Amino acid sequence: MANRSDTKTRILDAAEKLFAERGFSETSLRLITSKAEVNLASVNYHFGSKKELIRAVLARYLDVFMPVASAEIVRLQASDKNASLNDIFSILVEPLLDLNKVRAEGTSTFLQLLGRGYIESQGHLRWFITTHYGEHLDQFVKAVADSAPHIPPAEMFWRLHFTLGTVVFTMASADALIEIAAADFSEHNNIETVIRKVIPYLSAGVSVPVN
């Protein structure tokens, strides 16, 4: 049993690293099995398909992040019925940073994986996330909508997707941005400071009145 568990973990670890670095489409099962030092039969036994493996890699993070983030939003709204968008986005920072306890550099890896799914149009991931974590997503969307009631639902749809796109681009470029800020402005940043820098921008963009 322990050997099976070790094999499964090795596959997940190898797939996670390759997916984050190369993307889902560019990472073959052959590459994964080579890095994990297992055979293809092991991948099929534990996951059945590449799509299921992709979902399992993300689930390691989503199973931890989504319930905690959801609970934090509930707690915030219970203590402040007029919580701002900045408050709502900010309340997600600690649950995101806690993903570093799941895996080394877990926060960055998780956001990179989400970005890959967004950029590569992995439709099955959208289905997986909305099916398994829909209640948590709905709670977040409702909290955002409640904080910006002047934004019509159709417009909010677009703004939340623009928000996701901004986060994806920022996290994909985070290492380079940190280096540039250090060289040009003598700033010393890390993933947390980058996330906190983007929140006021997101809040302002989502809440600006419709013309």
Image: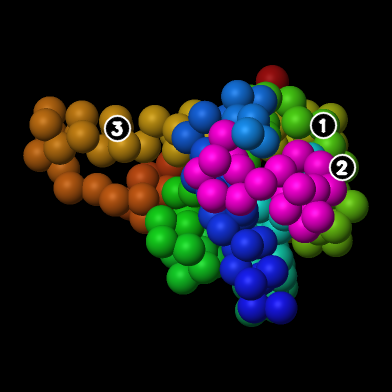
Task: Tell me the residue that label 3 is attached to.
Answer: 177
**Residue shown at 54% from the left, 49% from the top:** 37
Please, is residue 132 above or below residue 81 in the view?
Answer: above
Q: Is residue 8 left or right of residue 110?
A: right
State which quarter of the image contains the N terminus: bottom right
Residue 127 numbered mark, or none: 2
Q: Tell whether label 1 touches label 3 (CB within 8 Å).
A: no
Foreground residue among 25 and 210 = 25
Res 191 visible = yes
Callout 2 crowding tier (Cα within 10 Å): few <14, some 14–19, many ≥20? few
* Count of numbered badges drawn on the protein: 3
Q: Position of residue 28 (x, y in %)?
A: 64, 30
Q: Is residue 174 left or right of residue 151?
A: left
Residue 141 drawn in magenta: no
Q: Secondary structure at mark 1?
A: helix
- Residue 131 in the figure: left or right of residue 80: right
Q: Residue at position x 76%, y 31% from top?
A: 122
The answer to whether the residue labelled 2 contacts the one labelled 1, judged by CB atoms less than 8 Å apart, is yes
206 is higher (above) or lower (below) than 146: above
Mark 2 vs mark 3, CA separation in Å: 32 Å
- Relative image position of residue 118 (x, y in whole percent): 67, 31
Label 3: few (<14), some or many (≥20) within 10 Å? some
Say which label, 3 or 1, has the lower sequence index: 1
Amino acid identity at mark 2: Trp
Amino acid type, label 1: Gly
Amino acid type, residue under disc 3 in the picture: Leu
Which residue is disc 1 drawn over? Answer: 123
Graded by Cα atoms within 10 Å as few (under 14), some (14 to 19) or many (20 or more), the crowding at tag 1 reads few
Disc 2 and disc 3 in contact, CB within 8 angstroms: no
In the rendered image, the vertical position of residue 14 relative to residue 19, given as above or below: below
- Of the two numbered discs 2 and 3 in the rendering, the one whose residue sits closer to the viewer: 2
Residue range of the region highlighted in magenta in the rendering: 31-50
